[in-house]
Image: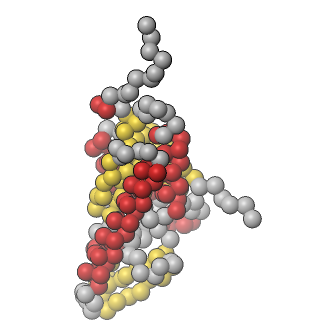
Amino acid sequence: MASCCAKKVPEREKQVLVVGVDDSEYSTYALEWTLDHLITPSPTPIFKLVIVFAKPSVTSAVGIIGPGMYVCIFEYPSMHTYTYVYAYRYVLIQVVVGAPEVFPMVEADIKRTAARVTEQAKQLCINKSVNDAIVEVVEGDPRNVLCEAVEKHHASVLVVGSHGYGAIKRAVLGSVSDYCAHHAHCTVMIVKKPKTKH
């Protein structure tokens, strides 16, 4: 007699789906979209969810440009968050002369950002009744970190958000989604947040 209920997919047989997150609304939307369309609709999800946050190193967030001179990159509107130049939208560059004391401040801010982003990702999963997601914080360039996560977890799908940069901004700042689409050894899904109509 056939059972009317779907069988649960054993954990070892589930495909791995990696979602890259950062502190932008675009990656939050990509994670929400993934949860709504690929993870929670099925009573027996086929994917094991791995959420990856690429944490910048202090030296990449504060570029050393000469003896005793550091470039601090600030993100609008907080004006205090130090992050990668090519991963976010920057509006202010300030040169700090002879200020090695900036490193501990930058490191503390990076840790706070990582904790906030990963906690938000965990909460989104819990709100959708996804309690088995793996959340990782890995130091490095987001492009490399995500491609390495795909390899490490043998992922079949990588999901990233699109910041919607134009051609010039993408050329200057770089594009994580563009890089992953060309270098990740799996299917790459780029989720665009719909533009709000006025």
Instruction: Find residue 120 and report its horizontal and vertical position in percent.
Output: 42, 60
In the displayed structure image, the side of residue 32 where residue 84 appears, left or right? left
Q: Quadrant of residue 144?
A: bottom left
Q: Residue furthest right?
A: 198
Please name the residue shown 42% across and 50% down the image: 126
Please name the residue shown 46% across and 82% down the image: 79
Q: Quadrant of residue 59?
A: bottom left
Instruction: Find residue 122 and report its horizontal and vertical position in percent.
Output: 39, 54
Figure disc tally:
0
Q: Residue furthest bottom?
A: 97
Q: Residue furthest top?
A: 1
Q: Which image quadrant: the N terminus?
A: top left
Q: Where 115 falls versus 68 (above or below)?
A: above
Instruction: Find residue 64 and report its horizontal and vertical position in percent.
Output: 29, 80
Question: How are the residues colored?
Answer: secondary structure
Please name the residue shown 32% across and 84% down the image: 70
Viewer-proximal residue, 88 or 110? 110
Res 165 visible:
yes
Q: Where 17 falls versus 121 (above or below)?
A: above
Viewer-proximal residue, 172 or 159? 159
Q: Where 161 falls versus 88 (above or below)?
A: above
Q: Which image quadrant: the C terminus?
A: bottom right
Res 156 visible:
no
Instruction: Find residue 21 and report its horizontal and vertical position in percent.
Output: 42, 57
Please name the residue shown 31% across and 92% down the image: 97
